[in-house]
Amino acid sequence: MKEKRAEKNQVRVMILPEYGKQKLLTYADSFKDLADVFEKFDSGDNERETAGADRSEYLYRRKVLENREIMAGHLHEMAQIMTEVAKVSFAYVPLSDRKARQVAHALKQEGISLKEIHYIENTNGRLEIGALLASEKTKGITGEEAAAILSVLFDKRLMVSKETDYYLDEKYRDFHFIEEPAYIVLTGTAKAVKENESVSGDNFSQFEMDKSGLVMMISDGMGSGEKACADSLRVLDLMERMLSAGFSGDSAVQMVNTSLSMGGAESNMSTLDVCFLNLYEGTMELTKVGAASTYLKRDNMVEQISSHNLPLGVFGKLEPEVTTRKLIDGDYIIMVSDGVLDGLSQGIGEEVLSEVISRITLENPAEIAGYLLNYVIRSCKVAIRDDMTVLVAGIWENT
């Protein structure tokens, strides 16, 4: 890495070496040029050629044009990610000698040896501390213990980054500590399988993303059984890969949709329901593609958030419905698959579920998920007609 030093406050801005930066920007320009090739395809000539063609040929050519537009969008997204990476910088601030000695002394009293320490102010303004630490005790010391000491010394509530080893030992290792988020989240799930099926066509996923919060997803494969299960699992796996690689939620959805729509007979339609929770800012972003309603519970008030688009794989290009909300302490987010709503009452399941949720006094998300699923199963007048999934998240201030 290349460093620029500001003499007054000893702040160094770490940036990519110029050669590497220019290389990334060159790649980005190449992807933009490729996108332009797809976008500038002469659709006028294509329209004239298809004027006398039969319907099947016309539809085929329209599909090709649509796929070109989608590919152009993906290339633009990749170019944007490369451009952003090339511009990444962060402030590396060495500790004063006095502060470093103070930290080393405090850690040593707890059996922790400090070799090097610095803190980093990243682009989001949050504090991140890097330290080279080793344990002086025969019994291992946890990173959480070190984080507690550093929290007092730096007057910030710090936690161990998930990329860091959990235990300190006799060898010096790099440990990274980040600020604790303003909110914490607990989740709970409950599932039921369609009558006479051994596996559910619904699947869900939860994972942490870029140190900012949690992503929760539900996908419902078309039909039921093993094929539906495999389809929904593939959707969730692709989404996790795209989001972890740095693609925006919209671009990730578009790529997964393209994969399904171009898969032919091997691919079936699947719904997708994604909830992005930013635990530092206390916000929720819902992205829905053919998914059932989501419910935001605040005390005894319930907001129903619905979508009206079609599932993944129907059209080559789609418009995901995105909704954002500011969250407060004690809010609950309830995500469900359509089997839950169908199990209540044909046509009015959404309203019935809102009423049921408003009366819940339970506080544990797992208990809420279990209660709702049991309520729906008891309400079924016949056997369970479809797979059911309930995913609940509770949000609280991190006090």
Image (cartoon, helix red, strand yellow):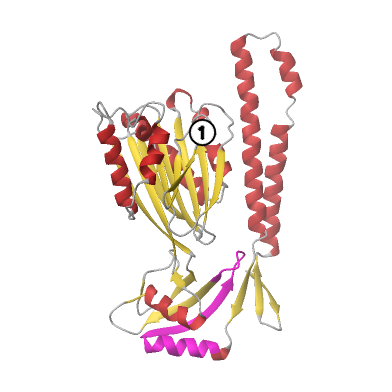
Amino acid carrying mark 1 in the image: Ser
Q: Is residue 347 left or right of residue 324?
A: left
Does residue 6 show up magenta in the picture? no
Q: Is residue 71 left or right of residue 272?
A: right
Where is residue 364 drawn, in percent x and y? Answer: 32, 55
What residue is pinned by disc 1?
259
- Above or below, comparing residue 69 to residue 250 in the picture: above
Label 1 neighbour load within 10 Å: few <14, some 14-19, many 20+: some
The structure residue drawn at horizontal position 44% and vertical position 32%, both measured from the top left corner, is 270
The structure residue drawn at horizontal position 65% and vertical position 55%, both measured from the top left corner, is 84
Where is residue 319 drawn, in percent x and y? Answer: 59, 34
- Above or below, comparing residue 48 to residue 190 in the picture: above
Where is residue 148 drawn, in percent x and y? Answer: 41, 77
Please say whether residue 24 is visible from this viewpoint.
yes
Number of marks drawn: 1
Quadrant of the image containing the C terminus? bottom left
Q: Is residue 213 left or right of residue 31?
A: left
Q: Which residues are magenta?
A: 99-127
Dot 1: element: helix
Name the residue nearer the viewer: 35 or 275: 275
